Image (tube, helix red, strand yellow):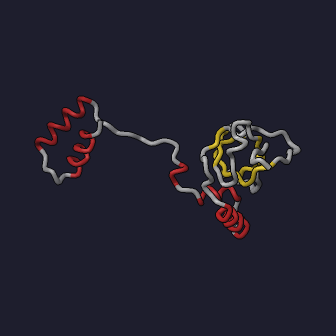
């Protein structure tokens, strides 16, 4: 076995307790490993799932391709995958939901907000800072925003 597999079984955070088999595109066949996160099509959505195993066993149903490999190295090792399977079985919980709970919260963040002052806002902040006390929390926030470029 050269580490180049045609398919992978992916656990998705959906209320169905079963893995879903996806075809691996040529560019990902040697890179995807058990424990890595991948982006896959699921119905009309795109979901992030955890690879449970890679194999060459052709599924009976037609498969869709993995869209993207998120992690170059596994984020969950074999022991954590086994623990997730045990937790799912013991608590009758879908494995995809259990594995999602085992990942850092940062893996769920899709977007963030960045706040900054406009030029007019900087002028107004300088005027407020000139007339305000340094202990006021509003003044401290304005100073941080003023320094941010």
Residue at horizontal 86 percent and vertical 42 percent from the top: 61
Side of 130 where 36 appears, left or right = right
Looking at the figure, which quarter contains the C terminus?
A: top left
Rendered image quadrant of residue 123 = top left
From the viewer's perspective, is residue 142 above or below residue 89? above
Identity of the residue furthest to the right in this view: 60
Q: Give the total of numbered labels.
A: 0
Farthest residue in the bottom direction?
90
The answer to which of 29 and 12 lies nearer the viewer is 29
Residue 82, percent from left and from top: 70, 65
Residue 133 percent across, percent down from the top left: 13, 50
The answer to which of 149 and 30 lies nearer the viewer is 30
| Residue drawn where x is 69% and y is 50% of the image | 33
Q: Can you name the residue that lies furthest to the top here?
A: 119
Residue at 64% of width from left, 51% of height from top? 36
Residue, far front: 2
- Rendered view: 78 above or below 68: below
**Relative to residue 98, is residue 108 drawn left or right?**
left
Q: In the image, 20: left or right of 87?
A: right
Tell me which residue sits at (51%, 51%) in the image: 106
Q: Is residue 63 left or right of residue 125?
A: right
The correct choice, above or below, for 116 with respect to 54 in the image is above
Q: Where is residue 62? Give x, y as percent.
A: 84, 39
Q: Position of residue 144 (x, y in %)?
A: 26, 44
Q: Which quadrant holds residue 22?
A: top right
């Amino acid at each position: 076995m050269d580490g180049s597999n045609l398919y992978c079984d992916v656990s998705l955070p959906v209320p169905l307790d079963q893995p879903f088999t996806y075809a691996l595109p040529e560019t990902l066949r040697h890179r995807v490993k058990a424990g890595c996160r991948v982006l896959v099509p699921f119905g009309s959505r795109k979901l992030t799932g955890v690879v449970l195993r890679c194999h060459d066993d052709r599924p009976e149903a037609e498969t869709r391709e993995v869209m993207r490999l998120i992690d170059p190295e596994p984020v969950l090792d074999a022991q954590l995958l086994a623990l997730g399977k045990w937790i799912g079985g013991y608590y009758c919980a879908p494995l995809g939901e259990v594995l999602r709970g085992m990942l850092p919260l940062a893996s769920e963040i899709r977007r963030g907000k960045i706040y900054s002052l406009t030029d007019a806002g900087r002028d107004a902040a300088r005027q407020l800072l000139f007339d305000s006390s340094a202990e006021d929390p509003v003044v401290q926030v304005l100073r941080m925003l003023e320094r941010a470029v």
